Image (spheres, rainbow, N blue to C red):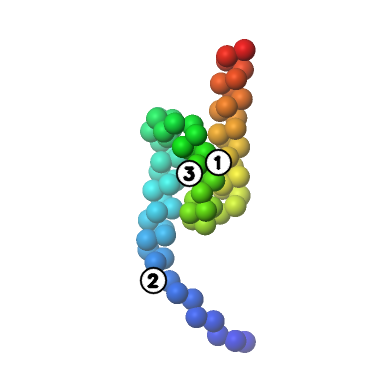
Amino acid sequence: MEKMYIDITDLQTLIFERRQIIALLDNAELWRQIPLSQRFDIVESSEFITLMGESFTEHARRMLENEIEAMVATIH
């Protein structure tokens, strides 16, 4: 088996950043204070996808889309 070097110097930073994102998403009041377009920008950013993973990103995107649908239904 071949040994592979993995650089984990930024691992602590990545874990901290991921926890911050989860805490932000869990705080609905704070999360909703961010304009919807900026929330989409956050969720669709490469940094978010890298830190949170594809499935979590897709879930967050669906939540935002559901919020838009609810807003549209309220308007009509």
Mark 1 vs mark 2: which is more N-terminal?
2
Q: Bin the neighbour count of mark 2 within 10 Å (Cα to Cα): few under 14, some 14-19, many 20 and up.
A: few
Label 1 secondary element: helix
The amino acid type, in three-letter code, at marker 1 is Ala
Q: Image height check: is 62 above or below 3?
A: above
Location of mark 3 (residue)? 42
* Residue 76 on image: x %, y %: 62, 12
* Residue 22 on image: x %, y %: 44, 46
Q: Residue at x 48, y 37 (%)?
A: 39
Q: Residue at x 48, y 44 (%)?
A: 42
The amino acid type, in three-letter code, at marker 2 is Thr
Q: Is residue 53 left or right of residue 13?
A: right
Location of mark 1 (residue)? 60
| Eye-nearest disc, 1 or 3 | 3
Q: Image height check: is 51 above or below 9?
A: above
Q: Is residue 17 left or right of residue 5?
A: left
* Residue 37 on image: x %, y %: 50, 34
| Count of marks overlaid on the render | 3
Taking the image as drawn, is residue 31 in sight? Answer: yes
On residue 9, the disc is 2
Label 2 secondary element: loop
Q: Residue at x 41, y 51 (%)?
A: 19
Occupied quadrant, residue 25 = top left
Along the viewing direction, whichever of 63 and 35 lies nearer the viewer: 35
On residue 39, the disc is none
Taking the image as drawn, is residue 52 in sight? Answer: no
The Cα–Cα distance between marks 1 and 3, rounded to whole angstroms, is: 10 Å
